[in-house]
Amino acid sequence: MVIEEFETSNVFLRHPDRRVFYSSAWSQRFLVPFLAYRVAMALFTLFILIYSFGDYIVSGYGAAWFFIYATNWTLLIQTIYYNMAAVVTALACCNIGTRLEIASNRRLQTTSRRTRLESLLPGENGNLADAESDCEDTEEENLTVEVSEAPPDDLCWYHKTMWVLYNVMVPIALMITFSRSLAMGLNMSFEWARSGLDPLTDILHHFCNGAIVVVDIFVSATPTRILHVIHPLAYSCIYNVFLVVYWVSGGWGITGKRWVYPVVDYSDDNWRASAIFVFAGLFVVLPVFHLLVFGLYRLRCAIVRCVVGTAAESPERTRLLSE
């Protein structure tokens, strides 16, 4: 239910199954093909980053201008995410995560047994043997409860980091692709399209980034929460603060103008329109794109449910792996 998305708990980075961050929405059994996909995405985003950064150097603009544009910020986040995702999936393929879970379950068994012994000593009938017997009788039941019921949070720090990066890059990448397509449809052009940069850089920056995140939405099992809009919102606020600081410090864009983007010009004549544009982008356009991502996520869940049903590997759970 969509109404459940607005529960306060969904603000936090909690999920009962860490497998959604290293497996496909279509099957969690075949990790090797999914690893091949993630390695391909990691190499592709790394290629885009290196190629575009090199284009700035070869064109004579230098590295400094590369880091003033939101497109390049987002590209850097994409590269970090896909390479991190490839590493996490590779570790899962090597059963490292499984071994850790087995070790955790063994510790859980030991703790459960010890707790039961302490609670029964000197035994219900007055001796230690009875206590151990009572503990053994209930040990299996205790373990069944612990294993079958998903914990409220099964994520490590790197799973949560991946989730934040995913929440940031997906709606922002779609916004960038939409903005560039709208500019082309209106027979407009961004300043770097008129510069000496390679046209391939423009294509890789503004179209490929949006395409790969759409593919990832439908291939990976990564979930989307409506209340996680705070992540791309925080990222966008940080970038807009950077633009203000950059403008105040006397910086200029790639075309030699005081603005980085023509629609974000804080000079005396344009600052009001620019402020309205920024606030509309932050609190109207960005939430709309985040809701679009959530809609695509729910569409993926519906398609997976129709094609393969619920996760067969987890019969205790009635939800999809990606839900």
Image (tube, rainbow, N blue to C red):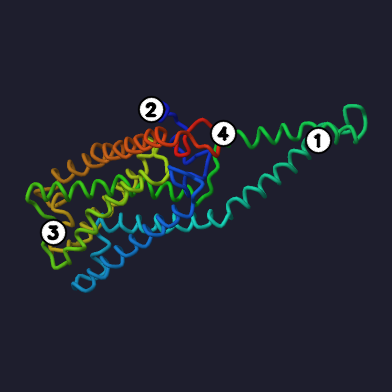
Kind of element beneath mark 3: helix
Q: Do callouts 2 and 4 mark residues in contact (Cβ within 8 Å)?
A: no
Nearest to N terminus: mark 2 or mark 4 = 2
Q: Position of residue 205 (x, y in %)?
A: 24, 57
Amino acid, disc 3: Glu
Q: Which mark is residue 136?
A: 1
Circle nearer the viewer, 2 or 3: 2
Q: Position of residue 26 (x, y in %)?
A: 43, 42
- Are there few (<14), some (14-19), or many (20+) residues within 10 Å of tag 4? few
Q: How far apart are labels 2 and 4 at the CA level? A: 24 Å
Q: Which residue is mark 3?
A: 191
Q: Quadrant of the N terminus?
A: top left
Q: How far apart are labels 2 and 3 at the CA level? A: 41 Å
Residue at figure coordinates x 48%, y 38% from the top left: 321
Nearest to N terminus: mark 3 or mark 1 = 1
Q: Which residue is mark 2?
A: 2
Q: In this rendering, would 83 be left or right of 96?
A: left
Q: Nearer the viewer, residue 69 or 258?
A: 69
Q: How far apart are labels 3 and 4 at the CA level? A: 55 Å
Where residue 53 sits, quadrant-wise, is bottom left
Q: Which mark is residue 45?
A: none
Q: Is residue 104 above or below residue 258?
A: above
- Are there few (<14), some (14-19), or many (20+) residues within 10 Å of tag 1? some
Q: Which residue is mark 4?
A: 315
Q: In this rendering, would 206 be left or right of 22?
A: left
